[in-house]
Image (tube, coloured by chain):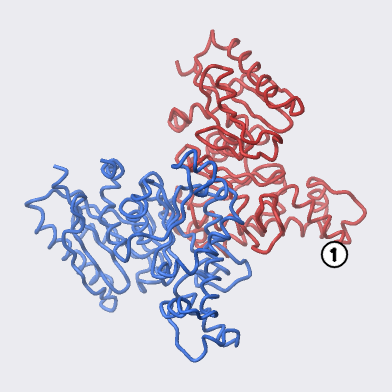
Chain colours: A red, B blue
Amino acid sequence: MKANLYSIGVDLGGTNLRIAAYTQNNGLLETILLPTRLAAGRDAVVTDMCHAIETLLTRYSASHSLAGIGVGTPGPLELPAGVLHNPPNLTGWDDFDLRAAIESRLNQPIVLESDANAAALAECMLGSGRTMKVDSLCMLTLGTGVGNGIILNGKVWDGATGMAGEAGHATIYPDGLACPCGSNGCLEMYASATSVVRAANQRIADGTAPALQGKTWTAHSLATAADQGNTDAKKIFIDAGHALGIGLAALVNTLNLPLYVVGGGLAQAWHLMKDTIFEELHHRSYVYRFTAPGSPIAMRNPSGATHVLPAELGPDAGLLGACILPFSEYGTLVEDRND
Amino acid sequence: MKANLYSIGVDLGGTNLRIAAYTQNNGLLETILLPTRLAAGRDAVVTDMCHAIETLLTRYSASHSLAGIGVGTPGPLELPAGVLHNPPNLTGWDDFDLRAAIESRLNQPIVLESDANAAALAECMLGSGRTMKVDSLCMLTLGTGVGNGIILNGKVWDGATGMAGEAGHATIYPDGLACPCGSNGCLEMYASATSVVRAANQRIADGTAPALQGKTWTAHSLATAADQGNTDAKKIFIDAGHALGIGLAALVNTLNLPLYVVGGGLAQAWHLMKDTIFEELHHRSYVYRFTAPGSPIAMRNPSGATHVLPAELGPDAGLLGACILPFSEYGTLVEDRND
């Protein structure tokens, strides 16, 4: 029976829409990739999504039993309602009851989560969490913004309204840069792919980064320049590492989880940020100092050690997370992983 | 049977040692108050504690069934081991295996927690959590330092090593005051009873608080002066409110709990800090703005509203928390409360 159990997962992005069939034994069986037709309106996007889901349901229902359908969406997402609230990556979807739209179209229930939470679940159950043999973690996803997901005992921590995991908007520098969220000095303003490019442009304009002048930078080209020894590019990642370290130290002190994971595109520059991240962790978190790998507590009780690592899963994390959401919901995820 | 079920709770403090018998129907049946004889050494303190526990066991065992023995202790406390690590309020107890010392003396298991976690559990199950009908909360205890406890679904969130709930050492101002924990700019340096007195003395020395000059201040007398219109005293609490608001906003964004509680001695100045606290929450937490009482989400789904309130329980919170720890451990606390 278990070998025949499959799920369908949806990764709804601002650019791409991916729908996959998945089994716990064989992973992704098949993935349908579609453009997210935002210009055609949200109903068209939901129709595209449901068509693809139905295609997979038809294809696999004869040979497999459906565990459920998981959907990951850009947030903010209100749960359990399933309503989007001013999602920055889905313009015009404010107050959209995504759950009702999908469920009435499919005529069956779905398991809905924000994309950052789904990615964190995948990283926990199929990525670094599996490697480290833990079932709780906190993941920061460094992309356009800084996403965050918290997994406790193998389940997404949704909070009271599905909006937990917004540590990307924790204040790092109280008088810092204005954030689109309305606050100042959010982690997201200092440690996203967007923020490193902004920092480079600002320093070029200020005349404080002579080695960066005369070029148009991306997060990727900045990292390459830093790798090639460009001092001004290196400084940008050192500053991002400081912000990440300050934010992570607060999370370690608050949650005392066994694993914190840094993912997303900017995590490819992990090696450029990690020294500063750990410097701040040692300075700002006595929980980290007590429990860091090599500490007496970690030596005596390895499962109590605090690990801070780059993510193992790449861009598929969100899709994989959506696929395993139904298994998590029915409580079989941790047991199955440990089979 | 349930009416006859009792527990014994211990609140181990740096000054006082309190041991109580408790039932869920009648609360504290009897409390034994002893001085904490730190000068006599930790074994003497454990002996005093165990004598008192045995006195209560003898007194209630004929008429009641023991649910368990709960002990709250100043941290940092490593769990499940039960070992103290450099506790600032129990000098000389570094690396002390408190669990083994008590359990071998009593010849039975105990449920051990840090005092801030025990207080948060009591506030959740018997205080503001009960009033607000929620079973998850985050409590900040503003005393000598800033303690913190997180309750999720009616249970203490211990983290991997019992050290969760140190949000008092989250960084608020990265270049701020040096904290005894080794970091800079911790919440504890700006929002504890100690910190408001330090701020007053610093401003007197700076000459920036003429209305405070010529007196020796306590947190209590500063609050009284502020209530009587002393502008410089008022400013001290406004600044503490800013720090608390910044810290709470990060916690709301990260955890999305239905309730955040501010307790401890300095919470008596709640009315002097609350405007600033809520100003920062509105500015820095979009999760708070989405879910604040009166928001559309909170109106539609009252159980999803985010409440930030002063604690209901006073100095007994820690003792009550120790008493209900055994019931929490056996998972009957939430069900019983909802009877």
Residue B200, compared with residue B84, is above or below; it is: below
In the displayed orientation, state which residue is furthest to the right: A214
The residue type indicated by label 1 comes to Thr
Residue A270, compared with residue A99, is above or below; it is: below
Q: Quadrant of the C terminus of chain B?
A: top left
Q: Position of residue B205 (x, y in %)?
A: 57, 88
Horizontal side, residue A93 vs residue B326: left or right: right
Q: Residues within 10 Å of mark 1 (few under 14, many from 20)?
A: few
Asked if one can make out residue B201 in the rendered structure from this viewpoint, the answer is: yes
Q: Position of residue B126 (x, y in %)?
A: 30, 53
In-front residue for pair B166/A228 = B166
Which residue is under mark 1? A208
Q: Position of residue A240 (x, y in %)?
A: 70, 56
In-front residue for pair A109/A119 = A109
Q: Quadrant of the N terminus of chain B?
A: top left
Residue B127, compared with residue A17, is above or below; it is: below
Asked if one can make out residue A26 in the rendered structure from this viewpoint, the answer is: no
